[in-house]
Image: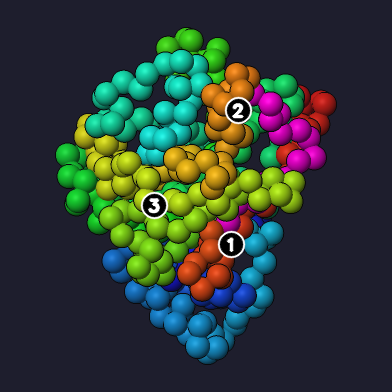
């Protein structure tokens, strides 16, 4: 099934069921008002939502209405946890190679991960506000999963059973703030502003054969100012599947329902497939020509991130955002 959260003036929005073709929606208040409520009691509430979903797709929903992605918040507007991995080691290899550094052997066995802010996500079509374009504004196209409860010490195989929903993320990064923060030895913070998510989150059965091995084996398309810059395969070269990423968190703590886990920038060794973040393009330019040439994003720029199924239809709807200047009084 496919689920979304509509803006209603509250912090957590209104849960709706969305038709498979993303054209229609049905309020789910009779089952659960919010997605977090469903994640908290998945085994009881999900089957009821599946019934609504079937009726909607069969044209039998009593109160269906046109689905509008621009009215959506993130599927889970605020979460108990947002943990983002770097599961595509090609991305790490490029970054390291561009600065003449080797990738430590441990990186191929132990996933990289940071914990970002989860109290304030952006909707799929919300503007992305920043105080300065000098901060090095960059998009990051990713796949993400929403989990149920996963107990401490869970194996990767068992952890994969905790995946409830799949969606897309734009994990904004302010590249020029990263070096100073990493130099402190405490990781990312201000360089990682609010993440945006696709309009719709889907259960793994909606992905069909594309969901295998804890990965989504489909291309993820990134478009920057109307030009397609990336068409990267999100499955084949994902070094650590979502089971491994979730188990990495669960090594020392419980993972609670309503946690979101990201794949990190989707990246392929075949450079002709393009890029899912500008930093990677700049790394390639540095490797090939000695210095980066592509600038980071400027105010007024727009990014669109989307994944199509094998039938050519959008699976999650698109993240479609414009970079805007934070009002001077607030900046």
Q: Magenta span covers which residues?
A: 292-306
Please give left or right for residue 136 compared with residue 159 in the image: right
Q: Report crowding for label 2: few under 14, some 14 to 19, many 20 or more residues within 10 A (C-alpha).
A: some
Q: Report crowding for label 3: few under 14, some 14 to 19, many 20 or more residues within 10 A (C-alpha).
A: many
Please give left or right for residue 40 compared with residue 233 in the image: left
Q: Main secondary structure of the magenta part?
A: loop
Residue 259 percent location from the top left of the image: 38, 45
What residue is shown at x 47% (from left), y 28% (from top)? Answer: 94
Numbered circle sitting on residue 56: none
Residue 172 colored magenta?
no
What residue is shown at x 35% (from left), y 68% (from top)? Answer: 209
Of labels 1 and 3, earlier in sequence is 3
Numbered circle sitting on residue 285: 2
**Residue tagged by mark 3?**
235
Please give left or right for residue 8 compared with residue 238 in the image: right
Figure label count = 3
Please give left or right for residue 330 compared with residue 58 in the image: right
- Above or below residue 274? Residue 63 is below
Work out whether residue 222 can be spotted: yes
- Above or below residue 43? Residue 154 is above
Work out whether residue 74 can be spotted: no
Closer to the camera in the image, 241 or 283 = 283
**Residue tagged by mark 1?**
317
Q: CA distance from mark 1 to mark 3?
A: 19 Å
Label 1 vs label 3, nearer the camera: 3
Label 1 vs label 2, nearer the camera: 2
Closer to the camera in the image, 291 or 247 = 291
Of labels 1 and 2, earlier in sequence is 2
Secondary-structure class at tag 1: loop
Residue 302 colored magenta?
yes
Residue 150 percent location from the top left of the image: 25, 47
Secondary-structure class at tag 3: loop
């Amino acid at each position: 099934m496919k689920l979304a959260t509509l803006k209603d003036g509250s912090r957590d929005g209104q849960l709706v069921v969305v038709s498979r073709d993303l054209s229609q929606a049905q309020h789910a208040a009779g089952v659960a008002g919010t997605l977090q409520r469903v994640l908290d009691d998945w085994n009881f509430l999900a089957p009821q939502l599946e019934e609504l979903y079937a009726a909607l797709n069969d044209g039998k929903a009593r109160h269906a209405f046109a689905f509008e992605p621009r009215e959506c918040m993130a599927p889970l507007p605020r979460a108990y946890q947002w943990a983002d991995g770097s599961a595509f080691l090609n991305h790490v290899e490029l970054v390291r190679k561009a600065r003449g550094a080797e990738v430590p052997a441990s990186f191929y066995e132990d996933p990289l991960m940071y914990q970002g802010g989860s109290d304030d996500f952006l909707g799929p079509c919300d503007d992305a506000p920043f105080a300065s374009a000098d901060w090095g504004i960059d998009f990051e196209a990713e796949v993400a999963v929403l989990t149920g409860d996963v107990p401490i010490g869970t194996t990767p195989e068992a952890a994969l059973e905790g995946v409830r929903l799949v969606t897309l993320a734009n994990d904004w990064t302010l590249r020029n703030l990263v070096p100073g923060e990493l130099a402190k030895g405490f990781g990312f913070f201000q360089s990682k502003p609010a993440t945006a998510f696709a309009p719709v989150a889907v259960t793994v059965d909606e992905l069909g054969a594309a969901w295998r091995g804890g990965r989504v084996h489909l291309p993820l398309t990134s478009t920057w100012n109307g030009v397609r810059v990336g068409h990267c395969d999100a499955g084949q070269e994902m070094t650590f599947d979502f089971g491994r990423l979730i188990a990495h968190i669960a090594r020392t703590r419980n993972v609670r329902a309503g946690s979101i886990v990201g794949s990190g920038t989707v990246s392929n060794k075949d450079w002709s497939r393009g890029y899912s973040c500008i930093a990677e393009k700049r790394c390639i330019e540095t490797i090939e020509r000695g210095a980066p040439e592509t600038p980071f994003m400027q105010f007024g720029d727009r990014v669109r991130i989307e994944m199509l199924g094998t039938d050519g239809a959008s699976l999650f709807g698109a993240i479609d955002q414009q970079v805007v200047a934070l009002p001077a009084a607030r900046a």
